Structures are given as structure tokens and as C-alpha cells.
Image: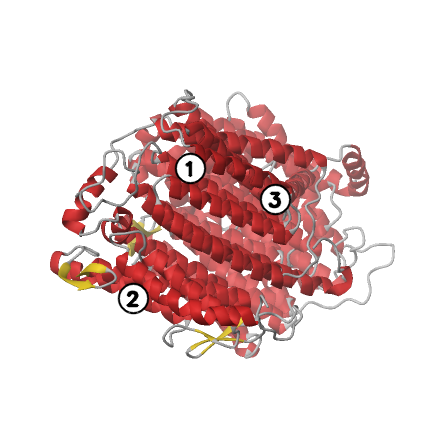
Amino acid sequence: MTFLESASLPAWLIAAIFFAAVLSSVSQGRGAGALRWILPAVPLLGFISLLIAAIRLDGEVASYSLSWAPQIGLNWDIWVSPVGLLLGLLVTGIGTLIVIYTGGYLGDEKKRASFLGILFVFMAAMLGVAFTEHLLVFFVFWELTSLASYLLIGFYKEKEESRKSALDAMLITVGGGVALLAGILLLGEAGGSYRISELIENRDTIISSSLYPLIFVCVFLGAATKSAQFPFHFWLPGAMAAPAPVSAYLHSATMVKVGVFLLMLMHPLLGETALWHFTLLGFGTVTMLWGALVAMVQKDLKRLLAFSTVSALGTLVMLLGIENKLAAKTIVIFLIVHALYKGALFMVAGILEKSTGTRDVAQLRGLFKAMPVLAVAAGLAAFSMSGLPPFIGFIAKELLYEVKLEIPIVGWAVLIAGFLANAANIVVAGKVGIAPFLKSREGNLESIKRPGFALVLGPAILGVGSLLLGIFPGLILGDGVAAAASQIKMSPVDVKLKLWHGINLVLLLSVLTVATGVVGFLLRERLWGFGSWVSRRFGWSGKGVFRSALYGFIRISGKLTDRVQSGNLRQYFATIFVAALAMLSAAWAAVGRDVPWEIGGEPFRPELIVVVGLLAIVLGFLSREQGRMTAILLLGVVGFGIAAIFGLLGAPDLAITQILVETLTLVLFALAVYRLPTNQKTGAHRWPWRVGAALLAGFVGLLFAMLTLKALHLEVALPVSAELAALSVPEAYGRNVVNVILVDFRALDTLGEICVLVIAALGVVAMLGRSGRSGIISKTPVSRSAVLEASARFTAPIMIVFSIYLLLKGHNEPGGGFIGGLVLAMAVVLQHLADPSRKLSILTLSPTGLCVVGLLLAIASGLPGFLTDGVFLKALWGGEVTLPPVGKLKFGTPLIFDIGVFVVVAGIVLLLYGAMAGVKERNGGLRSSVDSPLA
Amino acid sequence: MDIFLAVFVGLLAAVGTWLVVTGSLFRMLIGLAVLAQAANVLIFVSGGISGEGTGIIDKSENALGESAPDPLVQALILTAIVISFGVLAFAMTLLKKHRESEDLCRLPIEKGGES
């Protein structure tokens, strides 16, 4: 079968399992009968095909590459290596049993369907981790396992503790994942590749690189969080909030092993340095001892097992820290042994809880009669865990002692820790696998649900497996273990497994361990009392610290947000001003502080001083004014005053524009005030804020004044305006340089600006226009002013004609599209104010229509230049006519552009006015829905 | 002359800031308008105020005189005036909308206050 030999097998498996996930989720419990047989078959087939692949490959590595994003050198590089096969077989093998077990464990079919859906996603992710060589893709699968774990731990989502534990677990493992990602990126930096096989070739470069310690720490953090090493271990006992299949599968047999698996893969790359050796040995030993000691004093079945899993994970990490071939061999065997017995015992714990309704070890007793098969299976697993012959656990324990005896220098400390851990294992094994089934003098449990076949099958197979592997170790395990160990050590490891080694120091230690463990088991009640005393006395837990840190962090950020996002607009403005002030001051400091103080400089203009002085007084009133209408009028005065300044300083166009805009602003403001409800908060602020505001205003004013002085006397480069002014008549045929700049030289800017205006106007309409006004404002009866009506009848037509004159004349004299458009709009507004029933339209064009037509005209005027010279908005000129009032009028694209501006500006003003006055737009024009606002 | 205009620009900016930071929402709007004026005058003045005449070329000449004011600055401000008008209208609409929705939330129990 070439199919099974090809390294694409994992890809097919992952796809099949994802399909199973979808199938299960979509079924929603329908077709449960058929699915019950189909779903376990998927991982079972995976297990068989991986087993065949393992036998055929016989220790060789096969690889295969699927193109993902070749542009950035990212492919899904698959490799089938001995260590990967080991993990893959565990995932699919135990996975099969777990899927069957779940069928008996979760009664509700809908819940089971969604549960299995997530479980299959997890399974696929695990296979991805096992068989992916490209580290970035590996990381994706790695994170997917964390995510699936989160969903599974929090499966009982109605329980708060369940959700919190899930979050703990995810934050810890994903936090470690971030470290791992950093490590992977650094590794790619140092080793020039993300493929493990290529990185191994560059091992010397990586080890000697200055990045090595950082890489190691990052990778180790990833592994240590995932594999629950002290002090990150606390998420694992918390994860026991999950349903039993999850605990058995993810949190003992497979996912928590992924950290160890990563370290196994990384050993050829990063291992065999002092840093690696001491870090792993240290963390591993502490975790091993801590987990074992805490486990011994637990009362809850699953917590017991969880802490002993922590201990086992510590043992594995410790073994990886010991640099010899024997250790490599032991890791592989212990990994298998632990998965078998711990998976079985977790399933037993789940069944016991389900049947009796309790997980308290003290209450569980005398269950042998009710569930004899389960009792035997549990006993087998417990014996293997205790390391009794002829179980595989015995071989593992012998090897462990052998390894520890070989450690130089710190060996004795590790040996003692290992001895205690092994003894504690016996206590745990007894409490979970044996004690519940023993007879008791006190009343035995009644009303027990007998576990069905699906539930007992898993523990039974794993228990019998532990026994068979122990009796025939070499036959089944030998070659596989040797291949995996060789991969870790990068050199051939010889593996001969046998039960009986003869009488030696190791055997003596074993006997001592068993004796100590049995004594501990008999004294378990007292131990428990001691343990609870200790935990009361020294109530420290990683979980407590982590949670208080987490919730403290959330609280602080909440407070910070409350302060920063206070919802107080004034505060936001103050922040903007302070920031702008700081930046401008910095710029000021950089440019230079010398300010030219020239009081009374050359052209002394008394009339200007009068205007400025008057305006200063008006501003003083304005700053104190509380009444709205007065404030608007004062603002208008300021605006007109500034128009006067523009006029006095040689800018007639600006003066006219300013006057028109001020007038329109007055009208709009008046309309707004008229429409505004009256309950407006006064600006009553406490005095510290007022003082601060005054200071801020003072500084802003000072800065503006200094900037003005600086700008007046600072010439960074020669102004371009001289050139523009020189070209104005010969090339643009215009004497009003301002207008020439607007419609010719810098026409693109102007186009952008009128677009901004249209957008602002449409924004206003979007908020107010179509819907008119909401019904808050009281409707006053329609009343018209006869005087206004009469005068508008004469003035408005004259203004319309005048606006066209201004437009056409603007190229040579003050005027132009902007000014003309404003005048035109004003004429229409005047008519509408006088007679609100009039349509707000010009030549049947609604304000929106005017905006569109104007914009299109302006854009169209740019096209000829684009078509002839490839330059958008390049001016092209034609003939000249003489119109009596205007004088000479030269035709050209800038004229069309200016007409566009004219129409747009008129449209915008009408749009704004219409929105403010509450006029609804109907087809063809605006019709007032209500009364005259100013009447 | 410079110093008068500089002080005037400073005064505009200060009053604008003061209105924005201390006032009611309506005064804030007025403050924004004043600040826009300050910016316009600042830019205008930065083009130089020493000159005589306007940005319009005499019929007898073909170019602006030596001491004529800077036309480019004027072109910039001309559009700036119209744009700040648009922005102001937009802000005014926001204020109006805000008042209306606030009113709907509050119901007419809390009527009264400053006009």
C-alpha cells in the first residue's frame, strides 16, 4: 500500500477528522445510532494506518510538502518521524476509546454532538502538531489545541468556576504560546529556516548565536505552560472542571504531553547545553515533587489525578534534562506508560462520579460487587501506576531509578525527590484505583447506576494493555522506542526491555518504594488531615496569585478607561489642546526662541488698530456671554471685523467671502438656536477647572501670538507666489491671481475642497435632512413678514443676476465661483425665508442635485487636459467674447471649473440651510414642511 | 503693526479655547468658530502684511507689484473660510441631534434651566 507509506497520510487523516468534527456538530444528535459507530471508526482507522506506517517506516523519517503560501516560503511541511508517530498513535488510539466512552458518558445527544465536534477538532490539531515540521504551521496547530482545550474545559458553561478555569487555562497556555512564537521567529532568524530538519543542520550556528539563551527561554516557556510545569501548573487541576473524557484525553494522555513533545523535537536543536540541562532538571524535579506531594493529600478523585499528572509531567521534563541515552529511552517508555494508566484512571474516576454522584474518595467504597469488570480494569491501571511487576509501569520505574543513579553531582537530590514521587504515586493509585472497590465496615453505597459497556471498554483495554506490554515489552515496544529515543538523541539508541534485571540497587529501591507507598496508603486519612492543615497554614496557590493579578489588571484598566474616556467633551478638547500645545512648544523650542519684537513696524495703519481694538473688546464680551442669541451676534461682529482686516490688508476676495459666510453662519446659527430645545446645561464648572481652563486658554493664545510673529519674519524658502503672480496674465489670462490659483494653478486642491464640503453637507443631511425634524419642537403657525416678502421679491432676482456677474468677472476682478455661489444661495435663502412654501431649488435642481451637477462639471473640466496632455485639470483656452457688463470673457476649461464650483457652493449652502430649517426634500426640490423659521 | 495683529490672533485663540473648554455645548460651537477665525488670520498674516495693493493685477501691468500681498495665502484662506463654514454646520447639526436625542431619553421632567 503506497498510500500508507506516503508521508501525505497525516494530511488525509487530519482532513478526515475535521470532517468527523463537522459531521458530529451538524448532526445535532440526529442519526445518533449510526454516528455512534461511524465516529469512533475515524480515529481507529487513523490508529491502524499510523501503526502500519510506523512498521513500514521502521525508524526512517518521511516528509511531504503541501504548498500553502509559496510567495513567502510558507508550506505545510509534513514529516512522519518516530516521535511524531508516538504522539499520533497516542492521540488516535486513546482518542478512539474516548469517543466510545463519551457515547456512554454524555447522555444528552445534542450536547454530545457538539462536544464530539470540538473533541475532533482537538484531535486534528494534535495530529497537526505531531506531524508538522514547519514551525510556523506547527504553531498554528499548537494554538488550536489550546483553543479546543478552552472550549472543552468550559463545556459546562453554565457553571462559573468552569468558565473561570477555562479562561485560566487558556490565558496561561496561550501566553506561553506567544513566547513560543517569539522563540520560533528568533529560531528562524538564527537558523535561517523554519523547518526542523534544516534547523538541525545549522545546530552549531544556533547554539553559538547570541540569540540562543533567548530562544531557549521562549521555547521553554511555551513548553512549560502547556505541560503544566511549576509554577504554571495550577491551570491543570483547574481544568478538572471539564467532563471526564476531556480530563482523560486532553489533560492526562495527550495535550499536556505536547510541551514535552516540543522539548523532544527541540532537543537535537537546542539541547546538550548547560542551560538546557539545569533548567529542565530543576523545573522538572520541583514539578515532580510538588505535584506528588500535593496529590497525596487531595480528597477529590480528579484533583488527585490532576496533581499526579503534574508530577508525571515534571518527571518527563526532568528526564529530558538528563543528557544520556538511557534517559531518552526512559522518556519514551514513561510517556506511553503514563498515558495508558492515567487515561484509564481518569475514565474510572468519571464513571465513579457518574454512578455514585460523588468524587470524594472518603465516600467511595465497596463498589466491587456493583462493577466488577471496572474494578479489575482500575486495579490493573493502579498496579501499573504503582510500578508493580509484571506491569509496564514496573519497567518504567526501574528505568527511572537507573537514570537517576547515573546523574552526576545533584543526583542524590533528584533521587530522593523521585523516590518520594514514586511513593506518592502508589498512594494516589491506591486511592483512585483500589480503595473505592474495597469492602468497608461502614455502610456501602447504594443506589448505584451500573456503567455500560461503552464506559468500561476504555479502562479495560488500557488496563489490560498495561499488563500485556509489561509481560512482552520487547516484542511490541522495542523498535518504536528505540527509533524515538534515537531521534531525540540524534544517534542510535539500543533498547532492550525486560522485566527482570536481577537483584541490584534498583530493585532494592523499588521494594523500598512499594513499602513506603503501602504505608502511605494505609495512613491516607491521617495524611489528608496533615495536608489540609498545611494548606490552611500556608495558603498559597498559583491560581490565587494569577487570578488576583488578572482581575486587578482588569480593574485598573477599567478605572483608567473611566478616567480617560470620561464622556466629558470639554475634557477631550482640553486634552487635544494640551497635546497640541506640547507639540507646538516642542517645535518652537527646536526652531529657535528668538521672537522679533517690532512694535509699530513699518506701515503704520491707524484704521487697522481701531478695528483690532474694537474686536478685542467684542471678544472680551463674547468670552463672558451666556445668552445664545447675543453670543451669535457677537460672533458675527467678530467675523465682519475680520473681513474688514482682510479688506484693509489687500484681500478683497477674502473680505467678500468672509462677509457672505458670516451672514450665512448667522442665519444657520439662528435657525439652530430656534430649533434647539431650551434645557441646556450651563457651563457651571468648579473653580479648579476654570482656573486650569484660563491658564490653558492663556497659553494657547500666547502660542498663537508668538507663532504669528515668528511666521511674519521667518522666510524658510522663496515664496512660490511670485512665480504664480508672474504667470497669471500671460498663461492663465486672469488678473485676479487669487482666483487664478483657485481655478487653474491649484485646481486639484480646490476640487478636493469642494468634495470635502459636499461630504460635510451630506453628513448633515444624513443626520437631519430626510427625516426632517423629530417632533420635539413645537410647531408655530405659519406667519410671514410682509416687508421681507416684498423686499425679497425685488432683491432676490437682482442678487441672482449679480451672482452670475461675480462668477464671470471673477477671473479679473474680485469674485469667482465661491463668492458667486454664496450670493446665489443667499438669494434663494432670502426667497425661502420670505415665503417658506417655495421650493428650495434652482432651475428645478434640488440642492443635492446641484452638488452632483457642480462636482461633475468641475471634474469634466479636467478631462480635456487629461485627454490632450495627460494632465488632469490642465487648463485649455479657447476664444474670447465681449459681454457688455462683464467685459472681455475668455472661454476655457478653468471657466467651466469655476462654474462647477459656483454650482456646488450654492448647492451646499442650500442643503445646509434646508437641513437646519427642517425642509424635506421631495422629487425636484425642497419643499418646506413647516413654517418660516425666522418669522 | 505686527505686534497688534499677533496679539489679536492670540486673543482670538485664547477666547476660542476658553469657550470650548468651559462653555455649554453651544458655547463650544461658538468657540470652534472663533478658533477657525484665529487659524485663518494666522495664515493670512504669515503671508506678510507690509504690502500695498491687492492680489489683483493692475490693468496697466502684467504682474503683481513688488510689495503686493501674497495671493497664494489668500487662495488658501478663501477655501478655508468656506470649509470651516461647512464644518461648523456639521457640528451644529451634531449638537441639534444630540439635544433632541437627549430630550427623548430624559422625558420632559427635567425642563427648565438656562436658555
Which quadrant is the N terminus of chain B positioned in? Answer: top left
Residue marked by disc 2? A856
Residue type at mark 3 is Arg
Q: Chain of mark 2?
A: A
- x, y percent for residue A654: 37, 47
Q: Chain of mark 3?
A: A
What whole-number distance in Å separates the C-alpha atoms at marks 2 and 1? 34 Å
- Element under disc 1: helix
Give the residue displayed 56% in from the left and 74% down from the top. Answer: A28
Give the residue displayed 57% in from the left and 59% down from the top. Answer: A670
Q: Is residue A771 left or right of residue A642?
A: right
- Element under disc 3: helix
- Give a yes or no on whether discs 3 and 2 share a subunit: yes
Residue marked by disc 3? A570
Q: Which mark is residue B42?
A: 1
Q: Is residue A47 left or right of residue A383?
A: left
Q: Is residue A149 above or below residue A311?
A: below
